Amino acid sequence: MKHGLILLVLLTLSVYSSDKQARDHYLNKNYSDASTLYQELVVRTPHNFSYLYNYASSLYRLEDPVQAKLYYLKALKVRPNDSDTKFNISLINKQVIDQQFLFQGHWVHVAGVSVYSILIAMIIGSAFVLMGVIAIRRRQHAEVAKRFSVIFLFIWLMLVGVSVSAWVLTPSYGVVMSEKVQVFSGPSKTQIPLFYAHEGAEFKVIETTEFWVNVQFPNGLKGWLLKDMMAHI
């Protein structure tokens, strides 16, 4: 236990140090070093909004708008209503060819908080709720308090179940990362070529195989493209 706490403290200090260095590099317009450090932070904590947003901003400053858009979208997945992220994506969208392939919104959220964030918070909170119910049941509390605690636990678990269902049922999305991609009628280059999609185009993932992805673009067009020509948001 003691060694675990020491390791956690050291890891926290390491992340804080990298974060500070990355911010200093960015403010000093040393975007290459800032990008490298933010990339490491994103790998460590892939659902941290600030790291995703700042990594995307560094990439944009390095004139890599498509990679920047990917990580802005990942940041938006954490905070679906963030106005700065949406504005930056709108700037990048003006530089891509397939502007008609843009979704207005992707992820289910509650008051701007993603379902994933709510689910994690509720899972962590479940431990405290359960301990509180057990404590009430063991002590000499009134029967009303004991009944109320059980009802509260039942409602809490129901909400956790709803959050899990919403998270599982949320569609997966992706972005075309290659300059020009042929979309086929099936998962093979021998299938009928349907149309081209260009880098920066967004899509909903319908099905995946080992090498191919079946996708639907926001204008309703569907088809298959090679997995190594796209990235999941």
Image (tube, rainbow, N blue to C red):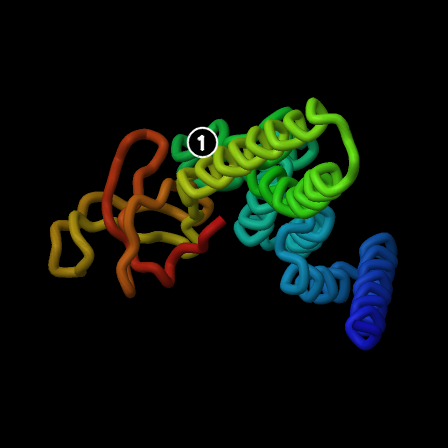
> In this orientation, which residue lies closer to the viewer: 229 or 42?
42
Left or right, 88 with reference to 219: right
Q: Is residue 201 visible?
A: no
Give the quadrant of the N terminus: bottom right
Seen at 20% across and 50% down, the residue is: 184
**In the picture, residue 204 is in which quadrant?**
top left
- As drawn, 222 above or below 185: above
Q: Secondary structure at mark 1?
A: loop
Circle 1: residue type:
Phe
> In this orientation, which residue lies closer to the viewer: 9 or 185?
9
Give the residue furthest to the bottom.
Answer: 3
Seen at 38% across and 41% down, the residue is: 203
The percent coordinates of residue 96 (x first, y second) are 48, 41
Classed neighbour count for the residue bearing mark 1: other residues with Cα under 10 Å, few (<14), some (14–19), many (≥20): some
The percent coordinates of residue 22 (x first, y second) are 80, 60
The percent coordinates of residue 141 (x first, y second) are 77, 31
> How many badges with numbers are in the image?
1
Left or right, 193 with reference to 22: left
Left or right, 139 with reference to 210: right
**In the picture, residue 135 is in which quadrant?**
top right
Seen at 43% across and 43% down, the residue is: 168
Q: Is residue 26 visible?
A: yes
Seen at 28% across and 64% down, the residue is: 211
- As drawn, 98 above or below 175: above
**In the picture, residue 165 is in which quadrant?**
top left
Q: Which residue is mark 1?
A: 103
The percent coordinates of residue 148 (x first, y second) are 66, 25
